């Protein structure tokens, strides 16, 4: 049995170090808030005000009506350049516009003679996501314009358009009815930021002892490796939980993200996640030879995997199966699922998220055990 009373002096030592280094403490408390506010506004999946170039070779009432549909949709800014195809293609090449719509001559005449009329849309595929969204917007606007033309033609022929059958999809969106990307992004940012901050908190602890020459004193004490790791991790758990409370409050009060879940469930999972991230930071600290190496290592094993492999930006289900296997060892994946569920879905509890609970607990214990084992080898 480990003598847990030896853990208390280590905790006290770490608390004193944190309190006396007021500048670092301020950075630890304020950095998550600054990062959340900055990235909360910068990272968005809502694409609006797309620059659109127009080549109207028909110059008719119908073509001008279609252009007004695009301009009044709220999604496009019509580029007021030359009406030549060459000028608009050049604007597309130099990124002045993202889409070019070409209305051919005879557009209105074809409609009046009951013939299909085509409109060409040129998209800048160098930004595939924006091009895909822009083409979707353009397709919807043209489809609505086509529907109005069809109804007008039917009315002109004496048909009662009210009796024309049609199939209409009636969507009903739960949990995020407005499809606001802020409600999706901000909870994800909390997981990413806390993964980085929590791991950085402890990634410097052991290596700092080595650089300051106090590592030999730790070796000479009777404290055991696991006791040392627990003693070092407890103060940072307190700081990490305070950070979580602050940035969750910022997400709710500043960004107006709804919180429909249970507060206790949120903080239980936050405790597990911070424990996991701190354990990972301790492992990095136990193998790093300098603080610079520890910081770089922490950024590499926390920030990149958390952003790319957690489902924060890219859906995990769309990844190749080999990459999907790699996502299982990324703790942010599980906490991100918890945050989005607790924020947006009522009635979510620990039992509902038992799989995420077990994974986070397992990784936290694993990282702590590996750190203690590595430290023990150093003692030997």
Image: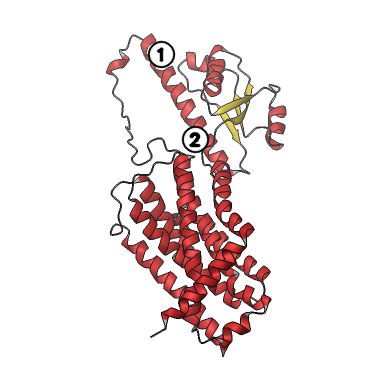
Identify which residue is drawn at 45% across, 52% down.
245
Most extreme residue toward the bottom, as rendered?
380
Which label number is shown at residue 152? 1
Nearer-the-camera pick, 224 or 331? 224
Q: Give x and y (percent) for residue 310.
A: 48, 58
Among the two numbered marks 1 and 2 on one chain, the one whose residue lies closer to the N terminus: 2
Distance, label 1 to label 2, CA atoms, is 24 Å
Residue toward you, 91 or 368: 368
Q: Answer yes or no: do the residues labelled 1 and 2 have beta carbons within 8 Å?
A: no
The structure residue drawn at horizontal position 35% and vertical position 63%, both measured from the top left corner, is 357
Depicted 92 relative to depicted 370: above or below: above
Residue 115 can be seen in this image: yes
Q: Where is residue 252 in the image (x, y as percent from the top left)?
A: 44, 42
Say if 144 sits above or below 292 in the image: above
Q: Where is residue 126 in the image (x, y as percent from the top left)?
A: 63, 44
Seen in the image, is 7 located left or right of residue 262? Answer: right
**Classed neighbour count for the residue bearing mark 2: other residues with Cα under 10 Å, few (<14), some (14–19), many (≥20):** few
Give the number of callouts: 2
Identify the element where label 1 is drawn: helix
Q: In this view, does 296 lie above or below 260?
A: below
User: Which quadrant: the N terminus?
Assistant: bottom left
Q: Which structural element holds mark 2?
A: helix
Name which residue lies at 47% across and 68% down.
234
Query: What residue did someone put label 2 on?
Result: 136
């Amino acid at each position: 049995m480990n003598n847990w009373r030896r853990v208390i002096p280590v905790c006290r030592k770490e608390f004193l170090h944190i309190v006396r280094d007021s500048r670092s403490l301020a950075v630890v408390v304020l950095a998550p808030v600054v990062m959340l506010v900055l990235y909360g506004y910068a990272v968005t999946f809502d694409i609006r005000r797309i620059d659109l170039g127009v080549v109207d070779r028909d110059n008719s009432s119908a073509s001008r009506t279609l252009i007004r549909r695009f301009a009044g949709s709220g999604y496009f800014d019509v580029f007021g350049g030359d009406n030549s195809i060459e000028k608009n293609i050049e604007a597309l090449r130099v990124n002045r516009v993202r889409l070019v719509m070409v209305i051919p001559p005879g557009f209105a005449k074809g409609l009046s003679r009951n013939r299909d009329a085509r409109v060409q849309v040129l998209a800048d595929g160098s930004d595939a996501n924006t091009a895909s969204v822009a083409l979707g917007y353009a397709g919807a606007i043209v489809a609505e314009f086509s529907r109005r033309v069809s109804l007008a033609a039917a009315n002109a022929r004496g048909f009662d358009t009210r009796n024309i059958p049609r199939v209409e999809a009636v969507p009903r969106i739960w949990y995020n009815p407005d499809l606001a990307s802020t409600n999706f992004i901000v909870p994800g940012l909390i997981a990413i930021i806390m993964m980085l901050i929590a791991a950085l908190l402890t990634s410097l602890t052991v290596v700092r002892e080595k650089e300051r020459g106090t590592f030999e004193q730790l070796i000479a004490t009777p404290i055991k490796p696991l006791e040392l790791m627990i003693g070092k991790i407890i103060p940072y758990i307190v700081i990490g939980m305070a950070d979580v409370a602050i940035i969750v409050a910022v997400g709710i009060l500043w960004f107006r993200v709804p919180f429909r879940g249970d507060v206790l469930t949120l903080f239980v999972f936050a405790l597990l996640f911070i424990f996991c991230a701190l354990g990972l930071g301790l492992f990095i600290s136990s193998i790093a030879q300098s603080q610079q190496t520890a910081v770089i290592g922490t950024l590499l094993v926390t920030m990149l995997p958390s952003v790319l492999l957690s489902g924060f930006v890219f859906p995990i289900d769309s990844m190749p199966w080999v990459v999907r296997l790699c996502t299982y060892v990324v703790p942010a994946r599980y906490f991100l699922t918890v945050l989005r569920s607790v924020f947006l879905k009522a009635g979510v509890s620990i039992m509902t998220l038992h799989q995420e609970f077990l994974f986070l607990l397992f990784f936290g214990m694993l990282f702590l055990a590996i750190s203690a084992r590595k430290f023990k080898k150093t003692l030997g």
